[in-house]
Image (cartoon, rainbow, N blue to C red):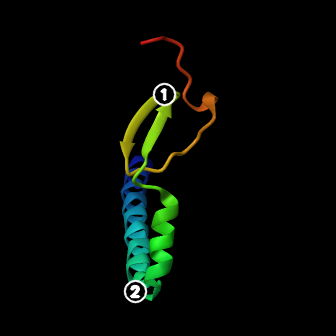
Amino acid sequence: LIAQLNCAYQATYLDMLGYARLNRGKIVYETMPSVPKWRWEAFVRVLSLNECLEFGEGDMGVPGGVTVFEPASANITTVDM
């Protein structure tokens, strides 16, 4: 009985997360017409999506992304590949 409840909860939780994401997307979609065009263009310009991302020092990647920095301890590599 406990295992059945656990499995049912896991499925319900995943559905809940999906519905929450859909609801946030709906809110963004409904809000976009109220954003002035000049403000949206300024926001996109600040993102610099036309510039290539730099994965490492001298390692240029593709354009159209946003760089996110993380601590070196987040993904420890003990073996060189």
Q: Quadrant of residue 74?
A: top right
Up-down: is 39 above or below 15? below
Q: Given the image, on which type of amino acid does mark 2 rest?
A: Pro
Q: Callout 1: 10 Å neighbours few (<14), some, many (20+)?
A: few
Of residues 48 and 6, the one drawn nearer to the viewer in this rendering: 48
Q: Residue at x 50, y 69 (%)?
A: 43
Q: Residue at x 44, y 29 (%)?
A: 59
Q: Residue at x 47, y 83 (%)?
A: 35
Up-down: is 16 above or below 77? below
Give the image location of residue 76, x and y in percent.
Answer: 56, 23
Residue bearing mark 2: 33
Q: Is residue 15 toward the left or the right of residue 56 in the image?
A: left
Q: Residue at x 54, y 28 (%)?
A: 75
Q: Is residue 42 toward the left or the right of residue 81 in the image?
A: right
Up-down: is 76 above or below 53? above
Q: Quadrant of residue 61?
A: top left
Residue bearing mark 1: 58
How far is mark 2 from mark 1, CA to CA?
A: 40 Å
Secondary structure of residue under mark 1:
loop
